[in-house]
């Protein structure tokens, strides 16, 4: 075999080895690219989660500041209603006193202008007439003093009512500013979460969708039982750990008699437009309209504990969203604070492994609301 032929044969034999080396090199490069992409995606996700968590902290702080304003507004509204009631009583007392005085004025004026003629016209003995005049003068003086006192009280109440209304106006402006800031934070959090779907609990979303598709969300018991996993670890229901979810006062306590039996939750009469906050850190398992409950959320707080909040006018969270303790979940309906007959009611349940427990053992009524009812 000639040297040229031998060199050609060696070249042919080396081609498969070169191809294998090139393939290994390409695979290594592709693997490195995938690993780099995975690390970049992980870093991006971590950055999004950190940003969302930071915004959530800011939102919690904004909601806490707003809660203080809502509590002040509630106290101002109550004070205004009390003052208005007192003013009505004072006005009625003043009218009664003035009516009584008006009936005596003609006689008193006649006696003052023509005492002799009045005495002669009256079929009384002189001593009886003098005694009657003295009595009427005493009564008139008493009524006049009472009328003056009621007038003074009415003027003072009018001043206090005016001051209270001015204070409410200032509080309303401050609350509106705080709500605007909180709404901006809500938008920022929504944007941060929309950029990374992994920030939501996909398993919770799919579980809720599947449950709804099977039409098993007929009752609250079924919803909680199917959505919130049970746990062998007992939850800590330390008093005050959760905080009242809304500014207002309790109008129905746990265990109170209702047409359906003892109440298994608490009912708060909420402040107008009040923000509803999550009393725990957890994952939203349900968010939407629910038969007989209105707009409602069910949050898995961990260790088999769940919180039900129902009766809201607007929701600000979605299924699968992770919540920080104190983060807003919705808003109550606005109403005229001077006519509390139409005040909205927030219904609250705390459940342990599906069984209702007394929320008072976990919620601190003084922290979130201005009264405990």
Image (spheres, helix red, strand yellow):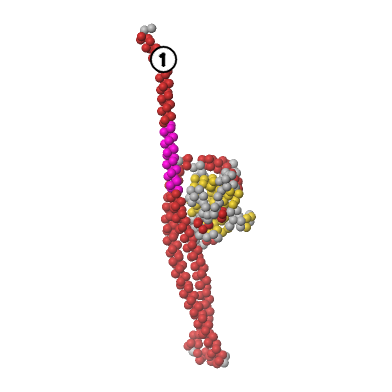
Q: Is residue 1 left or right of residue 341?
A: left
Q: Quadrant of the C terminus?
A: bottom right
* Residue displayed at 41% across by 28% down: 29
Q: Residue at the spot x=42%, y=39% of the render?
A: 44
The residue identified by callout 1 is 13
Please tell me how many numbered marks the rendered image carries.
1
Reply above or below: 219 against 145: above
Q: Bin the neighbour count of mark 1 within 10 Å (Cα to Cα): few under 14, some 14-19, many 20 and up.
A: few
Q: Residue at x 43, y 50 (%)?
A: 58
Q: Nearer the viewer, residue 167 or 225?
A: 225
Q: Say if residue 320 shows up in the picture.
A: yes
Residue 235 painted magenta: no
Describe the element under mark 1 as helix, strand or loop: helix
Seen as rendered, the residue at the extreme left is 4
- Residue 291 visible to the viewer: no
Q: Main secondary structure of the magenta part?
A: helix
In which quadrant of the rendered image does the N terminus lie? Answer: top left
Query: Residue drawn at (40%, 16%), measured in percent from left and top?
Result: 14
67 is higher (above) or lower (below) than 221: below
The percent coordinates of residue 327 (x first, y second) are 48, 50
Q: Position of residue 171 (x, y in %)?
A: 44, 60
Q: Position of residue 132 (x, y in %)?
A: 55, 87
| Magenta region | 34-56
Q: Is residue 53 part of the magenta span, yes or no?
A: yes
Report x, y in % for residue 324. Answer: 48, 48
């Amino acid at each position: 075999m000639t040297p040229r032929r031998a060199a050609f044969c060696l070249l042919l034999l080396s081609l498969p080895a070169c191809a294998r080396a090139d393939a290994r090199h390409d695979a290594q490069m592709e693997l490195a690219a995938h690993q780099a992409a995975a690390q970049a995606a992980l870093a991006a996700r971590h950055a999004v989660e950190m940003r969302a968590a930071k915004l959530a902290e800011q939102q919690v702080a904004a909601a806490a500041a707003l809660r203080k304003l809502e509590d002040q507004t509630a106290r101002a509204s109550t004070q205004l209603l009390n003052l208005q009631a007192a003013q009505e009583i004072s006005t009625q007392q003043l009218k009664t006193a003035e009516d009584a005085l008006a009936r005596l004025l003609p006689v008193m004026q006649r006696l003052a202008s023509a005492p002799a003629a009045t005495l002669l016209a009256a079929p009384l003995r002189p001593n009886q007439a003098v005694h009657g005049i003295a009595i009427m003068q005493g009564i008139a003086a008493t009524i006049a003093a009472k009328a003056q006192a009621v007038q003074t009280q009415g003027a003072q109440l009018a001043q206090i009512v005016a001051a209270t209304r001015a204070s409410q106006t200032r509080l309303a402006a401050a609350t509106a500013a705080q709500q605007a800031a909180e709404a901006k934070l809500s938008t920022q959090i929504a944007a941060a979460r929309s950029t990374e779907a992994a920030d939501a609990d996909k398993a919770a979303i799919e579980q809720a969708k599947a449950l709804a598709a099977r039409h098993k969300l007929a009752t609250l018991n079924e919803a909680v039982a199917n959505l919130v996993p049970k746990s062998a670890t007992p939850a800590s229901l330390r008093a005050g750990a959760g905080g009242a979810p809304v500014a207002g006062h309790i109008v129905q306590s746990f265990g109170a008699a209702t047409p359906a039996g003892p109440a298994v939750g608490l009912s708060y009469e909420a402040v107008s437009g009040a923000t509803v906050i999550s009393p725990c850190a957890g994952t939203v398992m349900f968010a939407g309209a629910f038969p007989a409950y209105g707009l409602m959320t069910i949050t898995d707080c961990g260790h088999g504990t769940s919180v039900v909040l129902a009766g809201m006018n607007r929701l600000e969270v979605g299924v699968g969203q992770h919540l920080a303790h104190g983060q807003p979940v919705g808003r109550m309906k606005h109403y005229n604070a001077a006519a509390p007959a139409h005040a909205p009611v927030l219904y609250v349940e705390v459940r342990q492994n599906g069984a209702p427990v007394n929320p008072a053992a976990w919620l601190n009524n003084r922290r979130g609301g201005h009264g405990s009812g």
